Structures are given as C-alpha cells and as structure tokens.
Amino acid sequence: MAKHKSTRKAGGKIALNAVMMAVALAYLLPLWYVLNNSFKVKSFISKQPFYLTAKSFTLNNIAEAFDKMEYLVAVKNSLLTTALTIIMLVIFGSLAGFGITYAKSKPLEYAYTAYVAVISIPLQIAMVPLIVMMRRIGLTDSYLGMAFIYNASYLPFIVFLYTGFMRTIPRELIDSAKIDGCGPLKIYLKIFMPLITTITGVVIIIRGVSCWNDLFVPLIVVSKPSMFTLPLKLYVFATAQEGQWHIVFGGVFLCIIPIIILFFAMQKTFIKGIMSGSIKG
Amino acid sequence: MKKLITLLSLLCLAATTLSACAAQPGGAQSESASTPTATSTASETTAVPPVTLTMALMCNDFYDTAQEMAAAFESQNPNVTVELSQIPNAINEYLQPKAAANLLPDFMSVNADSFALSLYEEGLLADINDYPDIKSRIIPQLVDPFIAPDGGYFGVSGGLSSVTIYYNKELFSQAGLSDADIPQDWPQFLAVCESIQSANITPLIVATADSTANNTFWTIGMATNFSAKGKDYAAAVKDGSFDFTQPGYVDVYAKAKTLMDGGYLVKGVTSLKAPGAMDTFLQGEGAMLFAGIWLAGPVFNGAEFEVGVMAAPWNEPGEKKGCFLGSETGYAIAKNANEEWSAKFLDFVVNGDGFYIYQNGRGNQPYILDYDESRIKMHPDMAAYVKMITTDTDFASGQPPYQVLQSKMLTQIPTTVQQVLNGESTPEQAAEIFNDLYNEK
Amino acid sequence: MKYKEKRKRHLDLARNDTLIGFAFIAPSALIIILFMIVPAAMSVHYCLTDWNGVSSSYNYVGLQNFTNVITAAEFPKLISNTLFLMVLYVPVLNILSILFAVILFDIGKLSNFYKIVMYLPNILSVVVAGVIWRMIYNPVIGPVAQLLKLIGLSHLMQDWIGQSGTVMYALSIGILWYATGFYTLIYLGGLSSIPMDIYEAAAIDGIGHFQKLIYITIPMLMPSITINMVLATIAVITGFELQLVLTEGGPGYASLTMALKAYFLAFREQRLGMSMALSVMITIISVTASLIMLKTLRKREVES
C-alpha cells in the first residue's frame, strides 16, 4: 500500500514536471525569439524566426543599435539614477521605519497609516505639475530630480515594508539599549542596521529593478538626449525604427543584457529576496 | 478608517496651500528667452563661444542623413557641438512635456499643426521672419501652412508632401495587370483590387495604427469629396460651421470600409504603423502601398522589384481626382539662448550644403525654389508623379485638410478609421463621434 | 505627588520619543509631500481648468472636464476595459500564481530552474515586453504568422492586437507572461511560512490534495493573497506603459484604459484639464479599491 502510494506520487511528480517544462518553454520562447533574432541578418528574420544558422548570423544589428542608441550614455544614466534612488530609498525608508517603531506612539501610528494610504495614489496624478515644478526648482534633467520622484512614489511602500519588519524585532532590544544610555540614532545605527540587511536586500532588488526599467518618469521629466535612460532610449528607438526589426532586436538585446547578467549572477538573492519580502506583508 | 480619512484630508489641505503659490503653469516660460542672446552676439567679434545645439528630429527614415548633416555643420562651425536625438513619429507627444517645462530642444521637428502653432503663440518658438534669407527661398505653398494668425512664421517645411499608391510591378503582372490597367476612378480601383486578390496576393498595404491614417484614407477622401468639388472645407471648420455628419464626410469612412469588407487590405491593417507598412511592402507581402511621397527614397531604393506610383483614384467616374499638396514635417527653432545658432543651422539646411545632404538622403520633394539640379538625385517616376498632381487639370490639389484641426480631433482620425475598419462603428457612427468631438466645449 | 511626578516624567519621555520619531520620518515624509502630495493637489486644481499644457493662461471651467470625460464616446469602453482587467485578469493572475506556487513548492530538484525562468520576464522593462509581443503578434511577418504559413494554416492567423474582439485577451497574455513569476514567488514565500505540522495533522485525517488546498493552503496564504490582490489591482488601474507600447489603446478604443487615456489626453490631445480630471478619478478608484480589498481580505484573514 505504502509502496503503491509512493510510486503514484513519483508518477505525479513526473507529470507535474512535464507540465512545468511546457510552461517554462512558453516563458522562454519569446526571449529566445529576441535573442536569436538579434544576431540574425534581416532577410532571415521572418523566414527562420526560431533558429540561427551560420549563414544568417551577424553582429551588425547589435553594433548598429549600440551606435544609434548611444548605448553607453544610456546605461550610465540608468545606472546613476538607479543607484541614487536606491541609496535614498534605503536610508530614508529605514529611518522612517525605525522612527515609527521606536516611538510607538499614537501620532506616529497615524503617520504610518498615512504612508500606507499613499501607497495606492498613482504617480500619474502628480506628473504634469511635477514637470512644471521640477523646472522651477531646477531639477529637470538631473539624476537627483528623477531620484526624488522615484522616492516619492516608492517610499510609502518601502516604509510599510521596513516598519512591518522592524516591528518583529523584540522591543526589549530598544528598551535595554535605552537603559544603557544609547540615543535613538545610536540604536538605529548599532542595533537595527545590522538586523535589517535582509529586508534591505529585498528593497534594493524590487525597487532597483523597477527603477532601472521605468519608462514613465524619464519620458516626462527628461528633455536632454544626453540624459535619456535605457528604457526611454529603447522606447524612442523602437517606435521610430518599427519595421527595421533587426535593429530593434539588437536594441532589445542590448537593453536586457545587463539586467539578465545581474539576475543570473545573483539569482538566489533575487528569488529569496522576493519570497522573503512577502512574508512580512 | 475615520482617522485615515481625517488624516488624508488634512494632508490634502496642507498640500493645496503649499501648491497655490506654484500653481501657475508656464509662468516661468518667458524669463529665459530674452537675456542670453545679447551675450553671444557681443562675444562673437572677439572669440566664438562653444555652443551645444540640442536637436530633436523625427528621422526614422533618414537617421544617417541627419547625422551627416549634423557632422557637416559641426565641421563648418568648429565651436558648435550638435547633440542629435531621434524622436518617434508622435512628435507632439514628445514635445508636449518639454514645452510645459520650457525645455524645448534648440532645433526640432514640427508639423504644420495646431500644436506647433500653440508653441509659437506661447513664445516658445522663434519667428523665422527674423531671418529673411530663409523664407525667401522656400516654395511659397510650403510657407503658408506655417504662418500664424499674427503673421509669424514658425516652421520651415521639410519637403513637399502628398500621398501616392506605390505598386509592385512584379506582383501586378502576376495578377495579369499591366501599366495600362492603372485605375482612374473608384470602381476601376476596386476592380484592380479584386483581380489582385483573386491571384492570391494582398492588394493594399496601409498603416492605420498611427497618424498615417490622416494622410491616406482621410485626406484623400476629404480632397476628393470636398476640395475637388470646390467646397472650402478648411474655412468652414475654422469658423465652427462644418457638419461632420454630412454624406461627403461619411463617405470618407465608407470607402475605407468598402476596401476592408472586400478583403483588400493587408492583414493587421489596424495595428500596422507606417514603417511596418513600408517594410511589409518591401518584403513583397502586398501589391500596393498607400503612403506618403516622403517614403519615395527608401521605397525605390529598398525594393528588390520594380516600383510604380499612381494617384489614389477615390473619385467617381468622370469626376476630378482629389489630392493635396502639403508640407512634410518641418523644422522649428526654439526661442532661447541658442536661437542664433539654431537659425544658422536652419540656414544651412535651406541655403547651404545641408539641403543637398538631406535631399539626397531622403529622395523626397525639395522645399526650396531654386537649387543645383545636378547635385540632387530624385527618382524620375516620383518627379513625374509630383508634376502630374501639381499641374494636371484632372487633379484638384489643395492644402491638406487636417491642418486646421485641433490636436484632440487630429488624434481621433486614426481611432475612428480603425473603428470603422473593425466594424465597431458604422461610417455614420464614426462621423457622429467626430462631429461630437468637434462641437464639444 | 510622587506618582504624579513619575507620570509626568513618563509622559515627557513619551512626547520626547514622539518628537524623535517624527524627526526620523521627516526626510521621507518631506519627499513624499513635496514630490507627490503637492503636485497631486496641483492636479486637483488643474482639473477645474481648461489648461492646454503649454499656454501660460487658462480659465476655470468648473466641473466641465469631468462632464467631458464622462460623456466622451470612449468612456464606456474605458470603464469596461479597466473592469475587464480588474475582474478577469486580477483573479486569473492570482489563481495561476497560487497554482504555480503550490506545484513548485514540492516539485523537487528543478524547482529553482522553474522559478528563475518564470521570474525572468519580470526583470525586463515593460517597454521590452511590449516590443517583443508586438513583434510576436505581427500577423504578416511575425513568428507565429510565419510558422502557420509553414504548416499551411496561415488562414488561422489573425491580427490579435488589431481586432477589437481579441486585443484585450492578447494584452492579458502579455501581462500574464510578464507578471506571473513575481506573484508566484510571493506566494512561494507565503507557502514556506506555513508550519508543516498542519499538513501532517491533515495527512493523518486523510485529507485529499484538493481539500488540502482549499481548507489549509489558501486560508494560510491569506496575507500573501491580500498583498497580491491589492498590488495587482493598483497595477491594473494605474499602469499603462505596456498598452502604450503594444497597442496604443487601439484598434479604436478597444484596448484603451483609463490610465492610458489620461496619458493621451495630457500628451497627445493637449487637454490637460481633462487628463487631470481623469487622473483624479483614477486615484479615487485606486485608493477606494485597495481600501475595500484590504478590509475584506483582512477580515477573512482574521476569521480563518
């Protein structure tokens, strides 16, 4: 009986694996389509969409896209914007989470509720006035300007995450540190900082990726081409080159390659990060 | 929950007070315009200051040419660095946020439409009347669309524009058609489509997922049903008295629907954009391409088969064919510190080598009056076609009818055309929608 | 006296802590207020005007913009498309993700491979996703069209994103491809926090797989479900980038959603006032929807 059950279980597992293989294939096919076509001579793209031959292989698409997209400039812009955004997010987000956890008083409870309420306000509603405002304060076409906008739209959720996590840290840690005469800043730096590395990893991954990939903010607030981020560059490039599929594929390839390399280098952190970030919802 | 609402409303209240002082859009727009020009003229006599010109050009079919122009200009003016960026066909969408922040590029593509006019009226675009050498060289018909009500001249045309039907001669002969079968009126056109289709070839490729629809179905329809019949459509639209539900307008949609119902249009017509349409034609996936004459260069050079051009015969037998002669997307210069140098670049494009680089790169119809014909290449068929629509008495060519429309209506032309093609609305309903938009407050 | 003094000191300390707390939240609060709340409030102001986005002058038109938005020909379609995504796509996405998570949870060795593959699209930009799917759906020279042509079935090929009947489904497939991985991972995180002994107890009682899913897994997953439903709903109501790249809302209004229309009104049609009016409506819907969802789902969490 027991034996029968375990073979059935193994059989079920094989079936499930077969299903998941098919799903995985469906997920990979669009990416493979891009990948193999970005190395293909144009006239072969529609004839042989899913495989490469020696005859159809070329590096010209990527070279041309690299040139026309001013790739390195775009990568630099995306990198700096993302880095600045993330640094600010982590510092300001953890500070706020700590403040709320530390004080444990009614007014800060309200503040926390306000943060949570703001999560669902879309950035869109602020966008047009932001364009005018950014110019007024001289922050158009600057990394800092973009970082501020991203922070305004991401921080509510980040504060929510940090607070949720910090509340699980035993209260006694704060109380005993207080008795030892530690000031709040010291408690934050010495006690909380080391404890929040996991959640900080989650913040960096989730928001780093969404910031790196964002189109909307640069589309609206960036005007100088030398400040274009990668997604904006690709949007402009792909809409203007539609029909020139080979170059578009080259551009898409260039766009996804940095993040894919990063993902594969750190896949464990990525996956663990997202999985663990959710538990404290 | 109550607390939350109180808190939110408090926050909003605080924010509104804070924002009240900043709530004037565009208020800052004029401040930068006047001062810096003086400094650059003053210093010109001593040393030429380095200048970076930002340039945003819609150049999907001539990016290399645009780069060549920029490089040539840089080598003639060593102090200038050109920062060229290619922008999508939806120019207005790209420029709008820049205009709102008063950060337009120094030199940019604009269409002769109400959006560009509003930029000029807001003082964001320079008046090119200030540079008389430019205006005097442009074909007068191409100057008019860029003239503001106050007489200002806010853009220089990038070429003479009209539409045509390119046809694949190979596929035509496969369908048993010769040059003698070129249709002269609407019934003949449908007959040609029918015989192409019965040879298992897609008859007509046209893009309707972008503003191409404005130039093809819509404009030719309007030109045939109004301009060719001597009706002054533009004036009526301007003074608000035009009725978009009249039969002549409904027919504009109805003709598109007839082609769709006959199965003559390429698969995917409602999701196809101009560059994709051209690509499909060049790959031999359809016998005819309904598109602008500005694609002549890439179409004639890119095709591996023989290409011919014909007028779109939307007319009933015995009636005049309708066509239009308009301006292509042109250039404007921002009213800012770099205006002088932007104007120099404009001069380079109109009076200098820039013209020849541009012309040979695009192979479209020149926008200036007299030029060195030996220096430019133009496909003879295209030249003959333009001559035909400009001089032949069978044609009634006028200004393109969409230039008088507001942005909100202009953007609805492709939408309404798509709806008709998809059978989502009848031609009458589409006309009704358009009319409602026109009469909206 | 002594007690009173002690109490006072205690209050002082608490007040002190509150002040410290506010000092800590100040930077983030300031950024949010300055770059989100203030401009949002300015939008509320613009939605009462006829500002065209360029002009330095505008007139107050009262609630005309709201009237125009609601009476516009495309408005019913905007609502139905947004609802389509909320009612059909959000539950489908979550059901699929839970299913995948449950399968992946004890599938064995290859689980990590599946996780990586499924999460892969999510690290790409929406622009990339849009461009890829636009090419895939191309009915003449796209890969599907070419494959069908090869096997002589080209008559089956349709213009998935160019037909009003299919465009929303085509779009949904694109979003599902893009998003399922992320939601699956969140559910996997939720699953791993369910104590094993519950299942063991259930196994003794002889409960089947399906019952296990319904009576144990899903109730225990409620926190993750809550967060995912809210995230997906907000994303659906406010997101528009994929539609912008993939369909531009077409054909006609067939895939136009409220958020995309708000974008078009502002940046294509020069009707900023109307755009802001629509944005205000979107904000109200987004905030209300997530509050309602949070409340009901939390309630269920407590009950279970």
Image (cartoon, coloured by chain):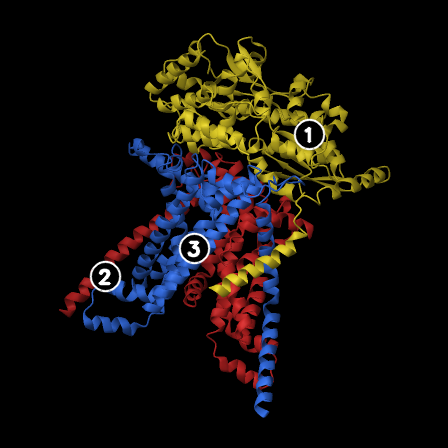
Chain colours: A red, B yellow, C blue
Query: What label does residue C210 carry, if any?
Result: 2
Residue pushed farthest right?
B46
Can you say whether A268 is above or below B49 in the image?
A: below
For the point 42% across and 39% down, the residue is C135
Report, in whole angstroms, how far the alpha carbon at label 1 lies from the one at label 2.
Answer: 70 Å
Q: Nearer the viewer, residue A8 or B256?
A: B256
> Where is mark 3, residue-wise?
C289
> Where is mark 1, residue-wise?
B154
Lower sequence index among marks 3 and 2: 2
For the point 68% across and 26% down, the residue is B149
Can you say whether A123 is above or below B266 in the image?
A: below
Q: Residue A14: give x, y in percent of width and height.
A: 24, 58
| Three-letter amino acid code at the position of disc 1 | Phe
Disc 1 + disc 3, Cβ < 8 Å: no
The quarter in which the C terminus of chain B is drawn is top right
Helix, strand or loop under label 3: helix
Residue pushed farthest bottom?
C2
Q: Nearer the viewer, residue C237 or C250?
A: C237
| Three-letter amino acid code at the position of disc 2 | Phe
Q: Nearer the viewer, mark 1 or mark 3?
A: 3
